[in-house]
Image: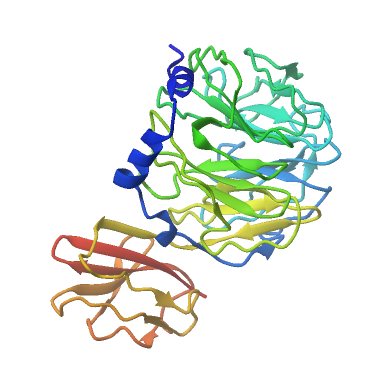
Amino acid sequence: MNKISNFIGSLKNKSLLFYLSFWGAANALTGQVFLNPVANPFSLKVSDMRQTPCFVDLDGDRDVDMLTGSASGIFYYYQNSGTQNSAKFMNPLLNPFGLKTAGAYSRIVFGDFDQDGDFDLLLGSERGDLEYFQNTGTPTAPKFANPVINPFSLNPNRKYMTPILLDLDGDADLDLLAGTETNGIVFQENIGTAKIPMFGDVIFNPFFIESAETDLVPTAADLDNDGDLDLLVANQSPSFEYFENNGTKFIPAFLPPIINPFSIKTNTGDPAPFLVDLDHDGDFDFMTGQTAKFNYYQNTQILIATQSFQNTNPPVPFPNPANYQINLSAFDVSNDALLGIYNVNQALVRGLKMDQFKNIDLSELPAGVYYLKLKHFHQVYFIKFVKI
C-alpha cells in the first residue's frame, strides 16, 4: 500500500505539523556541538574537485571506509586501515571493484537493494539519471556490475541529484530521498519490498521539507535521539539547513529549517556532507567534500537525559576540548547529587564532589572522549567532553 504517498496527498493543511510541533517537539539543539572543521583529516588526500564522500564498511573489518564521487566522474576509494576509534585512510584507489567512470559531478549512496548481505551502489550525476551498480561480490570483497539506468521504476529526470537511501515509513525497506539543483527535495517511496524494490511516483518537497536554496545535498541521521531520522542539508550559499523530524518513524513531518545549527561553521562553497560516527563515541560527526578539500566536523557534545532535571539548566563544560582543566557552568541541584567522570565504556574514572565544578584537574587522564555524569535520584545527565 502506498501509505506515505496517500498520506501526503490527503493532507490539506499543516495542522498535523502544528500538533506535532506543539506536543512532540524535541530540543535537539541542546544536544550537539560541532567543532570548527578540520581540513583533510585522518591522512586523507584530495584527488579531484568536488569529491562527495560516502562511508560504509566495504572490507568487513568493522570500521568505515570511504568511497567518493567526483567532478570528473571517477570513483575514489579510501580504505580505512585504522580502527573504529581512530580512523586512518590509505591513499585512494581509482575506480576500484570493477567500477567505471560515471557521469560528471557524481554523488553516491550505498544500500543493500537485493538483501544479499553486501552493499550495492546508487549514483546521481549531471546526466540526470540514477545509475545502479549491483554488488555481485561479497561483504568483504565487493565487485560491482555494469550500471543499470533508472531501475526499479526510479524516475529522477533531474540533473545533479544527490540520492540518499533511508526507511522513512518504518516498513524495513529503503525509500529514496534526493536533493536536486533547482527542484528542491524529491522523494520516491519504495512500494515494493526490501528484496524486490519498486519505487512509486515522484513527490516534490515531501513531509514539509521546504528550502529556498539550490544544489541541495542531504544526509540523514537521528540527531535528537528520538527514534526517527532528521535531515542535514547543505546548499550552494553555502550553509547547512537542519530539518528536525517531529513526526514518527512511520509518518515523518519535518519542522522548518534552522540555518547552521549546532555551532556549525562554513565559509567555503559547495559542501557535500555525510553523517557518520568516525570516532566511535556514539554520536554523529560529519565529513564534507568541498571544492578542493575534505572538512571534518567532530561532534564534541551530546546530552543524553533519562529524565530531565526539573527547573535546572544543564551544566555546560568549558573549555571543550580541554587540556589540563575543565569547568562546569553553574547549575542548581542539591548536594546529594552524584558527579563523576566516565570513559566511553561507561566506567567511572574519577568521582567528584558536588562543589567541585571549577578547575577540574584532567592532567592524569589520557587523551580521549569522556563523559561528566550528573545523577540525582532517577534523573541523569551525561555531558560529553574531549581531553586533548
Left or right? Give the position of 94 relative to 30: right
Q: Residue at x 13, y 65 (%)?
A: 377
Left or right? Give the position of 52 relative to 33: right
Residue most toward the bottom? 359
Residue 228 rendering spot, x and y as whole percentages: 40, 39
- The colour scheme applied to this rendered structure is rainbow
In-front residue for pair 73/115? 73
Q: Residue at x 47, y 22 (%)?
A: 173
Residue 353 can be seen, yes or no: yes
Residue 15 rendering spot, x and y as whole percentages: 38, 35
Q: Residue at x 61, y 41 (%)?
A: 218
Left or right? Give the position of 208 relative to 36: left
Residue 268 rendering spot, x and y as whole percentages: 75, 59
Please tell me how many numbered marks the rendered image carries.
0
In-front residue for pair 257/296? 257
Residue 78 can be seen, yes or no: no
Q: Residue at x 72, y 23 (%)?
A: 130
The quadrant where residue 99 appears:
top right
The quadrant where residue 100 appears:
top right
Residue most toward the right? 72
> Is the N terminus in the top left, top right, bottom left or bottom right quadrant?
top left
In-front residue for pair 218/165? 218
Relative height, residue 155 to residue 221 (above, below)? above
Residue 229 rendering spot, x and y as whole percentages: 45, 39
